[in-house]
Amino acid sequence: MFRSRLPPKLAVLPELEVHHEEGEHHDPFGQGVGVLAGVIAVVLAIVTISSHRAHAAAVMERSAANDQWSFYQAKRMKYHSVELGREIVGVLGAASPQAPAMLERYASELQRYDKESVGIQEKANEREAASKAAESRALRFDLGEGLLEIGLVMTSLYFVSRKRLFPIGGVLAAVLGAVIGASGYLAP
């Protein structure tokens, strides 16, 4: 009889046996589903990264638009301050010899602030439009990402149930998700 040279505690451990089913069951459809799940996962990763980048771009554009609107408000406050100064000089300082020069300077400042504020307002509107476009792209990526996730899960359910309906539904959801996700790249 064979005597183990292992310590007594280890000698009583059961032996590890690997059992193989006879004929080695081969599931070519399952292999295809596994490859399909891998492809869906790769497309999902691409759309997810694109979604995150689109959200970051939307936040940056919104921040830039807010900065432009703050700059616009500052210019308009200066404009109104100069208007007020002009009115005060017109009412209280009309007899002053410096009043005509001050009123002339105020008039030129009003024109400058008015012209500058129009340009700033245009830039702010452009940034707002860019922010809305980035938010639209991000929404498309998000919808695509969600459908790709559903497709991946449904496809993977084949391995639990061995029902072909799951990969078929998964492919449909994944294709729709990929199309919607791709539309995020094409959106203006």
Image (cartoon, rainbow, N blue to C red):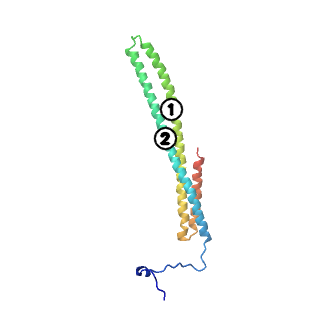
Q: Amino acid at mark 1?
A: Gln
Q: Of 86 and 1, which appears nearest the observer?
A: 1
Mark sitting on residue 96 = none
Residue 62 placed where, x, y %?
Answer: 49, 41
Image quadrant in which you'd find residue 148: bottom right
Q: CA distance from mark 2 to mark 1?
A: 14 Å
Q: Residue at x 58, y 55 (%)?
A: 178
Q: Residue at x 53, y 46 (%)?
A: 136
Indicate the quadrant where residue 13 lies: bottom left
Residue corresponding to mark 2: 62
> From this viewpoint, is residue 63 visible?
yes
Give the residue pinned by disc 1: 121
Residue type (three-letter) at the residue carrying disc 2:
Arg
Neighbor class of circle 2 (other Cα within 10 Å; few <14, some 14-19, many 20+) is: many
| Image quadrant in which the C terminus is located | top right
x and y percent of residue 158 in the render? 55, 68
